[in-house]
Image: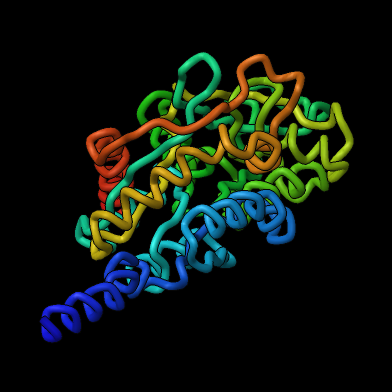
Amino acid sequence: MRFITATALAALIAAPALAQGWKDDYQVVKFGILSSENEKDRLMRNEPLRAYLEETLGVSVEIFTAGNYDGVIQAMAANQIEVARLGSSAYAAAYTATDGNIIPTLTSVAKDGSTGYYSVVLTRCDSGIKNLEDAKGKIHAFADPDSTSGYAVPYFNMVEREGFKPEEHFKSVVFSGSHEAGVTGVVNGTFDTAATYQDNDVSGIYQRMEDKGMIEPGLICKIWESPEITSGPWTFNGNLPADMIEEVTAAIESFPKNDPEGYKLYSSFNPEDANPENGFVRVDHDRYQWIVDMRDWIKDHRRSGS
């Protein structure tokens, strides 16, 4: 009887530790965010989510940032971070870098149920440039080689739909390093045009910069817009336990409902936007295979010089 009692007591003592599951091995969870805006603002926007995840999951949660998109992608490939919010093209790059060993689970959804956004090319309203043809012989800035809206989609569409190769059409083609840097370069006259993104005509990178007082309203005009792009996913390292992936995914999914004010900051809510982001929906890799294929096309196209 004494033996049974001791065994039962040992089981009771061990039970709390066993109940922790994946948290025993992952007492700190790091999530990466891309460099579409300056570091201060992206940390500020993601802080409510970080704090919510920390409270909900019961583990420490840290934000990982890098100076460019590739820094986050390589951190994922090197198992330095557990999860990242990636753009579609950055997801495709990470998929290639990890030989497919990543798992997308969520993307953003707007009020009307749409899950997409658009690549746009911008110029100064007083530049005299009204379309891509007018921009011939000018200086054009893409955002980052791993940006969907800032590089992959506009480059692909310029060649396949607009009928010109950017390196030949423009006087010079550069990478600004981030979406905000591209817009700032256009405002300052460093670039004549720049590729970036927007959700609609009242919500996007340059509209956000206007709201933050970074640029004056009315200086920037859109001259080109892409077909709709699928929003990028929350992506997990494929080496993680399945129950961890599901629990963290569910926590992120619950964030908009359980902390609406924090979600407004995270999603850059604009009261003038009739179709704002209002949460997340589940996705899988099939949603992004076309982006992987498009990146392969770009690599082959640039390699061949055709």
Q: Name the residue rendered at 53%, 43% in the picture.
A: 150
Q: Is residue 298 above or below residue 44?
A: above
From the viewer's perspective, is 192 left or right of 158? Answer: right
Q: Is residue 76 above or below residue 161?
A: below
Q: Is residue 155 visible in this depiction of the protein?
A: no
Quarter in which the C terminus is drawn: top left
Relative depth, front residue between 247 and 299: 247
Percent coordinates x, y for residue 40 in the rendering: 74, 60
* Quarter assignment of residue 183: top right
Quarter in which the N terminus is drawn: bottom left
Q: Name the residue rendered at 43%, 40% in the picture.
A: 232
From the viewer's perspective, is 199 left or right of 181? Answer: left
Percent coordinates x, y for residue 83 in the rendering: 41, 58
Q: Name the residue rendered at 70%, 37% in the picture.
A: 261
Percent coordinates x, y for residue 170 in the rendering: 57, 41
Q: Residue furthest front?
A: 1
Q: Name the residue rendered at 27%, 76% in the picture.
A: 14
From the viewer's perspective, is 72 left or right of 215? Answer: left
Percent coordinates x, y for residue 168 in the rendering: 48, 43
